[in-house]
Image (cartoon, rainbow, N blue to C red):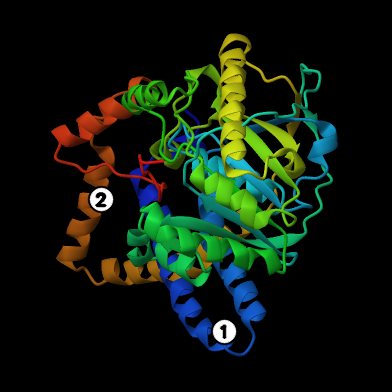
Amino acid sequence: MDIIGFLKSQFICHLLICYIFIVSGLIINFIQLFTLVLWPINKQLFRKVNCRLAYCISSQMVMLLEWWSGTDCTLYTDPESYHKYGKENAIVILNHNFEIDFLCGWNFCERFGVLGTWGNGFKSAIFLKYRKPDHQNISQQEGDTCSQPVVFNGISPTGKSSKVLAKKELSYVPIIGWMWYFLEIVFCKRKWEEDRKTVMQSLLNLRDYPENFWFLIHCEGTRFTEQKHQISMQVAETKGLPKLKYHLLPRTKGFAITVQCLRNVVSAVYDSTLNFRNNENPTLLGVLNGKKYHADLYVRRIPLEEVPEDEQECSKWLHRLYQEKDAFQEDYYRTGTYPATPIVPPRRPWTLLNWLFWALLLLYPLFQLLINMVSSGSSLTLASFAFVIIVDKLPDSRPPESVMSDHRFTAFCQSRNVRASFCWCPMDDRGD
């Protein structure tokens, strides 16, 4: 292991990264509080200021994936569609199989300037997690598979902002939850009957949004596990719906209402299927440890005109879409590639520069404080340093990451009386 790889695996480095994220996040939340005075004066200025402030938080997580972990992200798509990404409003449908797929979605947004930018305006990436029923008649745009990725260097960095539809409980969580509050995120109770009006009104507010946006949706509503898949396929059999091998049954209510509210505003649906090479099972802990993953993302651009307006037909269309996604997954596991041109969108420097700014701003006073405490000869300080060093040297008792499934990971945590919960799904209603 080289010196950089060794440092990435050290607990003290993880501690410093968390310190920077938490302290900078709280500082930004505090600044956002004062922006409320702008709301009655200039709503658009309030939105733009908070978009920039929120980018300071969300881009730190993308930095971990792009620069700290060095994860490779290859995009498979039609080159003609590629040049439209980041230049139009779109609904992005992403599968939900991995712990870090939301982070890969943010990375996808960042590569095309849609997560938010410094000095280039703002973009909106909206994350929604409801579920829906059936759809049909989907166009496929397939290109010839190339043996080597094509690298594009000319991405136009126009700007926008980012939004999510999240569980009500997350609004009370400092940093991320509070950041979303100031971004006018919709917090729902995961009960469709109560949330329908709120969601519709929030979507309609986007019709006159001043910047372009991407609306990212996990239609499966929750992350794929074998246990959830069995339950989902039982529901499919009961309702006479087509069974899926690699996905859960898509929930259609949220998708249908999104299409209805954003029609004539959104230009296309980006059908996105994410996979990792060599049967990698990426985790947030692996990213924090600097482990490099290899992500492949297949994106098809489908004009919104091809999505039926009728809710029932739209539902059938979505089910048909997931049958096709299942077929793409099958081909990927067999061939290790997707039926399109591989392209490597270039990394933008803004996530790294943002993190370096906060690191320089916050680490200098921290180190100065620690030096003063050590020089004072405080026994408590020396004991604290000894504790950190001992913890850093303790052997790792976790099972190998490559062989630990979601179910086994949960059992592992429970055996140690640890609650493992990382859910980005605000809507998991089984009643649609």
* Residue at the farthest top position: 334
Instruction: Determine whether 111 is above or below 172 in the image.
Output: above
* Picture residue at 55% right of the left edge, 32% below the top: 134
Check contact, mark 2 vs mark 1: CB within 8 A.
Answer: no
Instruction: Determine whether 95 is above or below 187 in the image.
Output: above
Label 2 and label 1: CA atoms lie apart by: 45 Å
Judging by the rendered image, the residue that carries numbered circle 2 is 388
Front one among 139 and 432: 432
Front one among 421 and 130: 130
Q: Quadrant of residue 149?
A: top right
Label 2 residue SS:
helix
* Picture residue at 43% right of the left edge, 42% below the top: 288
* Picture residue at 19% right of the left edge, 68% below the top: 378
Q: Amino acid at mark 1?
A: Trp
Judging by the rendered image, the residue that carries numbered circle 1 is 39
Instruction: Determine whether 230 is above or below 175 in the image.
Output: above
Q: Is residue 152 left or right of residue 55?
A: right
Q: Amino acid at mark 2?
A: Val
Q: Position of residue 243 (x, y in %)?
A: 47, 19
Query: Who comes first in sequence, dot 2 or dot 1?
Result: 1
Q: Position of residue 381 (x, y in %)?
A: 21, 64
Q: Can residue 72 be seen by looking at this rendering?
A: no
In this rendering, the count of numbered labels is 2
Q: Position of residue 346 (x, y in %)?
A: 73, 42
